[in-house]
Image (tube, rainbow, N blue to C red):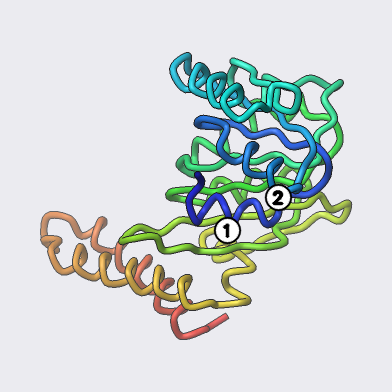
Amino acid sequence: MIDERLKYAANYIIGEKMVDIGSDHAYLPIYSIQNGIVNTAICGEVVEGPYHSTLKNIEVYHMSDKIEPRLGDGLKILSKEDKVDTITICGMGGPLIASIIEEGYDNVAGHPRLILQANNFTYPIRKTVVDLGYKITHEKVLKIGKRYYEIIVCDHDDEKIDLTEKELIFGPENLSVRDDEFISKVEWEHEHLVSIYNGINSEKSSGKKGEVKSKIKMLEEVLNDEN
């Protein structure tokens, strides 16, 4: 029912109740309840079509007493009366995930764990969660087919955590653990940017060429493990 990236995310869900934003048929909450990871869930959808698919799936899997579907914009579906232990936001671009957290976090009670699975550009996610007092406690790059996906797990920390620019771009846990799929992703990005760099006309786009060269240098630092 759910793919590898959602199964991986499910391993980090904690507590009795979760909320899944952009739930897409309620697959992750259904899986989590079936496997005893949580007892109950809230599913949030902002678009009518996926919302009705969520309603149907909840009924098909006989989860009406366990999963509450809500139609609304991101975390704004929550109120301070909702006590959730984990928030999952999966299958979106990094900037969209960051904006969902920024715009709706005032509706969240307490400091639940955040499990965020981005399809691209994770920098704004890390910037947003750190600004809200969260610490990134786990990161994982998954390669599924030809595409790379990133999972970021965050827990609130009373101590202010500051990340360097490199950590915001690549992830502090990724840089520390340096697993094979993370290195593979960095190598792919490096090859891609080198190809772009070689195709830029120096006379017409010297500024652009310098910008790309700077990014290539940072990727090479990561590959060479230079701190």
Q: Residue shown at 75%/42% (left/top)?
A: 86
**40 w.r.t. 3: above or below:** above
Could you tell me residue 140's position as x and y percent?
56, 64
Rendering quarter of residue 26: top right
Contact, mark 1 vs mark 2 (Cβ under 8 Å): yes
Tag 2 residue: 130
**Front residue of 46 and 194:** 46
Could you tell me residue 31's position as x and y percent?
62, 43
Q: Residue shown at 50%/64% (left/top)?
A: 141
Tag 1 residue: 168
Q: Name the residue type under label 1.
A: Leu
Rendering quarter of residue 191: bottom left
Q: At numbered mark 1, what does the secondary structure look like: helix, strand or loop?
A: helix
Q: Name the residue type under label 2.
A: Val
Could you tell me residue 21's position as x and y percent?
60, 31
How far apart are labels 1 and 2 at the CA level?
A: 10 Å
Q: Residues within 10 Å of mark 2 (few under 14, many from 20)?
A: many
Position of 156 compared to 199: left or right?
Answer: right
Specify the label residue 10 is tagged with.
Answer: none
**Front residue of 80 and 227:** 80
